[in-house]
Image (tube, helix red, strand yellow):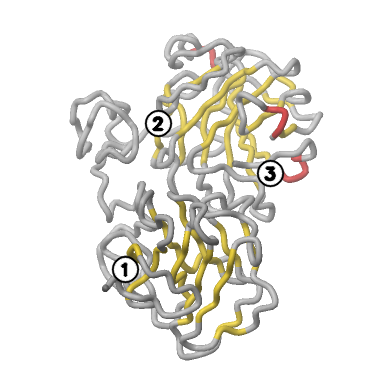
Amino acid sequence: MPRFSPGLFALLALVASSCDGPDDRPDPQSDAGTPVDADDEEVGEEVGEEVGEGVGVLVINEVAAAGEPDDWFEILNAGTAPVSLAQVTFSDSIEDPADHVGNFPASLTIAPGEFLRVQFDGLYPGFSFGAEEELGLFGPDGALLDGISWPSGASPQTASFGRIPDGTGRFKTLLTPTPGAANLDNPGGSSCGDDEEQGEEQCDDGNQLPGDGCTALCQEEVCGNRLIEPGEQCDDGDDEPGDGCDAECRLEFTPDALVINEIAAALDVGVDFIELFNTSEEPVDVSGWTLTDDDQETHRHTIEGRGALAPGGYLLLERDVDFDFGLGEDDSVRLFDEEGQLVDVLDWAEGQSPPGASFGRLPDGSGAPVTLFRPSPGARNLPNTP
């Protein structure tokens, strides 16, 4: 979840562009989903369900939660008069916006029909959207003007999540992001999600939910479609080996890589730990490298004072000794080098790291991760044999 501060405007890159006035637009309330009262605490679970009474004046029009490199969102003034943003705020929490609030410059005004891009500076990693997130826009009195929530997979890399048509339509995954400009529909139009396979659609299951076999773009959820879908670590559009992403859309491991070799999500039995393994033939200085779990913003540990890890060596890091966050029963660990580049990911589902066991690679460094019923922190992983 992003963390905003009242001084956020100093961190924003605001890019606005004009378009034709909204006089020929349909009634702003005609096709905007099912708005709920601003006092309603429940945010809709549908993909792209909007909330708030002010839809049609200041509208959240497009969101990029994997902005390459910076996340951003776009506001549209769908009214007929300029609107000052001096006392307008936004937050990643619709129910409790005061905790994570962002403000606009006092002098900023958005003209009728204008699209305003609000981009988070990549130098400030705390200001970013999660893959599954929500965004609210609030008026001077704190009333909710517009809000949107999206599930994991709805705003993947190289795509965005926006309204078709601008200002009034339901949100959908858009193949071509258009920050600061009118949204572009995907090839085949807006029929995706109507339960009828048409045009260039490969499938249409009647919704735009990811993770059910048919993507939000009505393409089959398969490795090789260039969309990072639930359960995939990467997707480069092919199934060729040796290019960093394997045929199962998992990150490939090279002989000179430092890998996450074993983890334990202790679940009240023992201590959570993370074990790294140097598969290369040279020492690797791990100073400045970073580990995170699924919460990449607040659960971060930078490795300091450990020096170089010898070839074939193991580095054991324990909770409350080396890092201060716990590992969940359905979680992941990510390893970043000193330049912030992702080096390795190890993720597990509920039941794969049960109490008294661990989850790691067999063989060390290169094998597929499995449940290990004989944890071996800081040493060679042991097969599950009697």
Q: Earlier in the sequence, mark 2 or mark 3?
A: 3
Of all residues, the one furthest to the bottom in this rendering is 281
Given residues 92 and 16, the one toward you in this image is 92
Q: Are marks 2 and 1 in contact (CB under 8 Å)?
A: no
What is the C-alpha distance between the residues marked 1 and 3?
43 Å
In front of the other: label 2 or label 1? 1
Given residues 380 and 214, the one toward you in this image is 380
Residue at left offset 46%, top offset 69%: 260
What is the C-alpha distance between the residues marked 2 and 3?
25 Å
- The amino acid at mark 2 is Lys
Q: Can you give x and y, in whole percent of width and height, for residue 57 in the image? A: 60, 16
Snapshot quadrant of residue 92:
top right
Q: Can you give x and y, in whole percent of width and height, for residue 298 in the image? A: 64, 50
Q: Can you give x and y, in whole percent of width and height, for residue 383 in the image? A: 31, 74
- The amino acid at mark 3 is Ala
Q: In the visual, does 233 lie left or right of 215?
A: right
Given residues 319 and 22, the one toward you in this image is 319
Q: In the visual, does 345 lie left or right of 304?
A: left
Q: Give the number of callouts.
A: 3
- The amino acid at mark 1 is Ala
Q: State the residue position of label 3.
A: 13
The numbered dot on residue 368 is 1
Q: Earlier in the sequence, mark 1 or mark 3?
A: 3
In front of the other: label 2 or label 3? 2
Residue at left offset 22%, top offset 25%: 195
Q: Pick the quarter of the image with the N terminus.
A: top right
Q: Earlier in the sequence, mark 2 or mark 1?
A: 2
For mark 1, give the secondary structure: strand
Snapshot quadrant of residue 219:
top left
Q: Can you give x and y, in whole percent of width and height, for residue 111 in the image? A: 67, 23
